Amino acid sequence: MRSTLVTIWVWTAIVTLMIAWLPIMAITRLFDRDPAYYRTGLMLRRLGRSMTYVNPFWDVEVDGTFPENPRNPYVCVSNHLSQGDPPIIARVPWEMKWVAKVELFSMPIAGPLLRMSGDIAVDRRDRDSRGNVLAQARTYLEQKCSVMFFPEGTRSRDGRVHRFADGAFRLAIKSGVPVLPIAIDGTRRALPKHSIWFQPNPEKIRVRVLPPVDTSEYDPDESRKLQREVRARIIAQVAEWRGVSPEDVDALAEPEEEAAES
């Protein structure tokens, strides 16, 4: 019963906030002369943060190595556990353009907000769309605005970190910007995949911005090497939080029994 009441309250508050934000975003965009619509994007991230504060079930902790100058761009990447991840990660104190599935851009209220902020739509079924995403992201980097990817492509079903796609890492190398790893944990049960119900008493939600990874020593054909390095750092942080070994968090790790047999 408590979960039902809190869920009704949270979704009512979220929808109310989104409706209230539409004119705010429209006015901000009207006067935003930055080519990356930086202030407009920041306004949308403030909406995301506000959404996390209305949920009494969520205990969120954000820390780490924040960029000294937010206009020095990064390719930001994070593991992905829940549809609650974007508003929670929006608590980091800088703007970055998010790569989000195209279906969100056609939703009422959410779609206009995403378009006004300049976020990037991707249709995972369309190879040309994925190429356009990287081109748009590179333009934002040139305009001194960071971009944000979930390189797993979808939310983890089992809480482990799955395979990362290489696109974000190729982009970072070719653009000559660092990769900024972001680790998140505690959201999988807070708002489970394919569920609209907020769960009571979830574990503590943690977000940590890890030290940036310099890409200047990587050649464009070494994107997988860079991807493995960044993924390993995120896995190590999640494993530390959970008090387990990295192999327990890594969905690609070979099971000990199979390793022994081989």
Image (tube, rainbow, N blue to C red):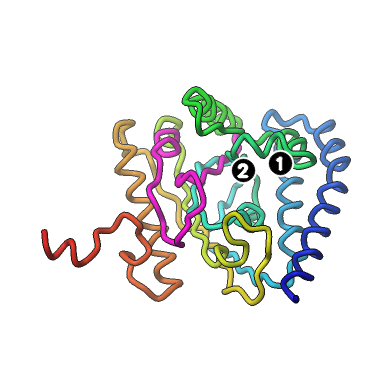
Report the side of 159 relative to 2 (left or right): left
Q: Residue at x 11, y 63 (%)?
A: 261
Residue 229 in the image: state x and y as whole percent: 33, 50
Q: Which quadrant: the C terminus? A: bottom left
Q: What residue occupies the far left of the structure in this picture?
A: 262
Q: Residue at x 67, y 32 (%)?
A: 36
Label 1 neighbourhood size at 10 Å, few (<14), some (14-19), many (20+)?
Answer: many
Which residue corresponds to mark 2?
96
Q: Residue at x 45, y 61 (%)?
A: 158
Gap between marks 2 and 1, in whole Å?
7 Å
In the image, which residues are magenta? 144-171
Q: Secondary structure at mark 2?
A: strand
Going from the N terminus, do you reach mark 2 or mark 1 first? 1
Q: Residue at x 58, y 52 (%)?
A: 68
Q: Is residue 153 magenta?
A: yes
Which residue corresponds to mark 1?
41
